[in-house]
């Protein structure tokens, strides 16, 4: 017997869920670009509606060219914030597209490219953002990297380990240290954690380790910076359809990406961005700090 349609779901929602059950086989070289993905991720370009929750704020989003970073940048701009985005120079095409959406929202967009695995570059990023925007109120540590084409810990190379740890953890500390001289009372820091901090995959042992460390770092920073009126939180996404997936996962994993969640599908960047908006809002999250918000398709974050 064919089940009756769910009256609470729209045709658009049914179509979105069906489309996300599986993905075509595809691969890219790291770091990956949005334009080569099938299907193209949804960053909220057509759907996100702002309500002035970040009016007048100035934000820096690392890894802001694509994926979750792009969705956050678009949402922040539509909520009234000026946005600087950090990204690798080879991601210029994606960065320009993100900047276009920020400007279409009527806000300032600052492009600050650079490789955050270089300490001087990472430490200089907040200063460059402030030069462009005139100040800084929100720091989003979103930049991340993973390598998944391995079967054993014995396959992990020192170069890979360096890139993952420096991108995900070292750079977060370096950027945050530099940003603190610009962040005043009422400011916030939001780190990008992962479901991998709670349900680590054996093929992602280095990546998962950095995400668990980010959770601890978030709590520690919140404890230290609360006295300065600075809130520190994190968002833990589950499997989200971004360029990082076809650029770092084997084709067979890409095809089944996200199917192991209780909701049975991968999420879209647009579905993660509202969590960052909430945590950044001095109106809505004024008493929220040391919290990790899960956007995981039903996987627990505790």
Image (tube, rainbow, N blue to C red):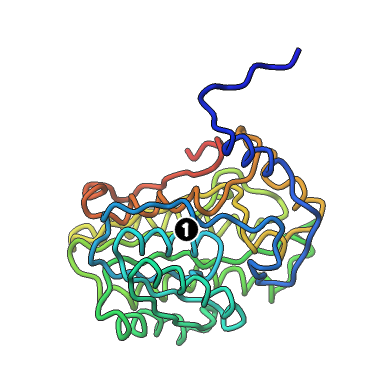
Is residue 169 shown left or right of residue 276? right
- In x, y percent, where is residue 210? 54, 60
Q: Quadrant of residue 77?
A: bottom left
Residue at 70% from the left image edge and 62% from the top image edge? 37
Look at the image and tell me in which quarter the N terminus lies: top right
Labels in figure, total: 1
Residue at 57% from the left image edge and 50% from the top image edge? 268
Residue at 46% from the left image edge and 73% from the top image edge? 100
Is residue 195 shown left or right of residue 229? right
- 33 shown above or below 75: below
| Crowding near the residue tagged with mark 1, few <14, some 14–19, many ≥20 C-alpha atoms within 10 Å | many
Camera-nearest residue between 206 and 27: 27
Q: Quadrant of residue 187?
A: bottom left
- In x, y percent, where is residue 101? 45, 68
- Residue wearing tag 1: 192
- In x, y percent, where is residue 297? 56, 39
Point out the residue furthest to the top here.
1
Is residue 140 shown left or right of residue 93? left
- In x, y percent, where is residue 196? 58, 49
Residue at 79% from the left image edge and 57% from the top image edge? 152
Q: Quadrant of residue 27?
A: bottom right
Q: Secondary structure at mark 1?
A: strand
Camera-nearest residue between 79 and 182: 79
């Amino acid at each position: 017997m064919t089940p009756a349609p769910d009256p609470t779901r729209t045709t658009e929602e049914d179509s979105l869920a069906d489309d996300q059950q599986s993905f075509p086989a595809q691969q890219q070289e790291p770091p990956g670009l949005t334009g080569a993905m099938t299907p193209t991720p949804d960053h909220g370009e057509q759907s996100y509606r702002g309500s002035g929750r970040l009016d007048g704020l100035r934000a820096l989003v690392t890894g802001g060219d694509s994926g979750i970073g792009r969705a956050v940048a678009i949402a922040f701009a539509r909520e009234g914030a000026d946005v600087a985005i950090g990204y690798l120079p080879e991601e210029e095409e994606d960065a320009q597209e993100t900047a276009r959406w920020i400007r279409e929202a009527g806000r300032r967009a600052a492009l600050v490219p650079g490789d955050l695995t270089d300490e001087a570059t990472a430490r200089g990023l907040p200063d460059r953002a402030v030069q462009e925007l005139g100040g800084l109120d929100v720091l989003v540590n979103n930049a991340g990297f993973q390598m998944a084409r391995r079967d054993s810990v014995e396959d992990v190379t020192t170069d890979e380990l360096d890139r993952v740890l420096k991108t995900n953890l070292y750079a977060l500390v370096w950027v945050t240290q530099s940003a603190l001289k610009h962040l005043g009372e009422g400011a916030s820091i939001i780190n990008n954690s992962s479901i991998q901090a709670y349900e680590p995959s054996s093929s992602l042992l280095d990546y998962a380790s950095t995400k668990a460390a980010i959770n601890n770092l978030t709590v520690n920073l919140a404890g230290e910076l609360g006295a300065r009126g600075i809130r520190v939180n994190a968002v833990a996404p589950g499997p989200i359809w971004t360029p990082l997936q076809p650029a770092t996962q084997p084709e067979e994993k890409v095809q089944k990406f996200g199917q192991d969640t209780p909701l049975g599908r991968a999420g879209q960047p647009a579905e993660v961005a509202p969590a960052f908006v909430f945590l950044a809002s001095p109106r809505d999250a004024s008493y929220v700090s040391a919290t990790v918000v899960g956007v995981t398709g039903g996987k627990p974050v505790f």
